[in-house]
Image (cartoon, rainbow, N blue to C red):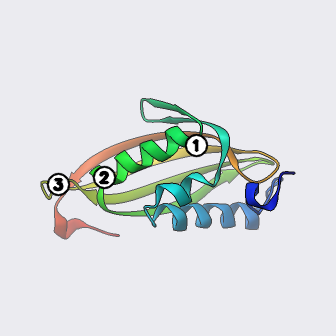
Amino acid sequence: MSSAAESRPPFPPFTAETAAQKVQAAEDAWNTRDPERVSLAYTPDTVWRNRAEFLIGRDEVKAFLKRKWDKELNYKLKKELWAFTANRIAVTFKYEWHDDSGQWYRSYGNELWEFADNGLMQRRIASINDMPILAEAREL
């Protein structure tokens, strides 16, 4: 296992309790909208597919998250554990945000996560759909 700075408990293999802890930690981190903080949960060579975008490494993840939260204003996320195995977790999620014109959206999706032994995520595969909503229809 790497140094404490390069680890993120809980570690695989996951139980129902530790998988739920990972999901809550991810939700909490993403809701900070801090690309630096969020990126530290991923291995330095992490591999992502986010919609149709493919990213490799923390630097690409940080740049992606900065672009994302520059566009998706007042972002608020809710994740739910779907399934888990020894070092993998599947989640379903929704988040709400608005663009710079004030149009609100609810985005729905699923993520597949794979973790290294040190508890950092080494692979993330995300499928996401956006639905325009009225501001008064917000749930989060």
SS for callout 1: helix
Which residue is label 1 attached to? 58
Which residue is label 2 attached to? 70
Of 133 and 65, the residue lying toward us: 65
On screen, residue 70 versus residue 104, left or right, reads right
Which mark is first along the chain, 2 or 3?
A: 2
Q: Residue at x 32, y 60 (%)?
A: 96
SS for callout 2: helix
Which residue is label 3 attached to? 100
Of 59 and 132, the residue lying toward us: 59
Q: Are marks 3 and 2 in contact (CB under 8 Å)?
A: no
Q: Amino acid at mark 3?
A: Asp
On screen, residue 94 versus residue 87, left or right, reads left
Rendered image quadrant of residue 100: bottom left
Query: Closer to the camera: disc 1 or disc 3?
Result: 1
SS for callout 3: loop
